[in-house]
Image (tube, rainbow, N blue to C red):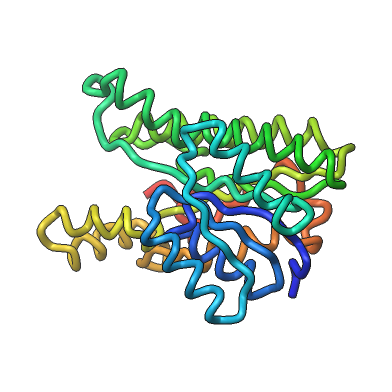
Amino acid sequence: MRVEGKMGLVTGAASGLGYETAKLLAAEGAKVLLVDIDVEGGEKAAEEIRAAGGDAVFRRVDVTVEQDIIDAIADVRSRWGGFNFMHNNAGTQLEVPLHETTNEGWDHINNVNLKAVFWGMKHGVLAMKETGGGSIVNTASALSLVGDPFLPAYTATKHGVLGLTRAAGAAYALDGIRVNCVCPGDMETPMIIKYWEATGDPAQARIDMGAAYPAKKIGHPREVAQMVVFLISDDSSYVNASAMVVDGGLLSKCY
């Protein structure tokens, strides 16, 4: 019960890392608002968490709409009486070479991966300053630390998330607000599974992706969720403005 009594929200919570984090937070005593644009998936996720004894509610939120984020934070405060944590997790990917990236594609991935995190942090900080502090955890990426020639726009947004995390963590420490990010490697999420399926040989695609990792496998979202919950909990009270790499050792080697 590391987060018992804490109240907050998780974006992109209908599946993948967001769902696993919301589920673990609720299992350890937190009150969680799950937000996502996927209404069917989000409602199902919240129902599963409640069935397991957790306190969770779903709300449809488009993180590219600032007012949606403001309203979601207000919902947490009015529903449970406080606001202690925020996991800015929603994200998307654009696998297009730099010279083929359109302005529309660039704007969309920046709106989801970076501007939405900026809004979440901005309004999360304002709420936490009024309610006695808290913890913000952003989902960055292993690509916040290195580049991927096939994912230039995605790489840029995740470098931006890391920069925002470091700046905000330093800026609001005296307000009792910690800001950290997790930098996962590849995880078995719907986005990755969709990629495997698109190759025509999902089993081989999984093996090929896992081959880059020391343990020859990719991670499961719950393994990253454990780090997120730690960063939200008081067990990490002196961890701030940090990037916690959860990549199975991927970045430890050159080849």
**Residue at the (63%, 61%) spot, across then down:** 32
- Percent from the top left, x then y, of residue 106? 35, 24
For the question of whether residue 252 can be seen, the reply is: no
**Residue placed furthest toward the bottom:** 52
**Residue placed furthest toward the left:** 200
Q: Where is the N terminus found, in terms of image quarters? A: bottom right
Residue in the foreground of this view, choosing between 74 and 248:
74
- Percent from the top left, x then y, of residue 251? 48, 49
Instruction: Please tell me in which quadrant of the rendered image residue 226 appears.
Output: bottom right
Q: Is residue 5 above or below residue 97?
A: below
For the question of whether residue 109 can be seen, the reply is: yes
Instruction: Please tell me in which quadrant of the rendered image residue 202 appears.
Output: bottom left
Residue in the foreground of this view, choosing between 103 and 36:
36
- Percent from the top left, x then y, of residue 144? 51, 38
Horizontally, is 10 left or right of 113 in the view? right
Q: Is residue 216 above or below residue 64?
A: below
Horizontally, is 184 left or right of 196 in the view? right
**Residue at the (39%, 32%) spot, across then down:** 109
- Percent from the top left, x then y, of residue 242? 69, 44
Q: How many marks?
A: 0
Q: Is residue 157 above or below residue 190?
A: above
**Residue at the (69%, 62%) spot, across then down:** 230
**Residue at the (36%, 67%) spot, across then down:** 217
Residue in the foreground of this view, choosing between 230 and 210:
230
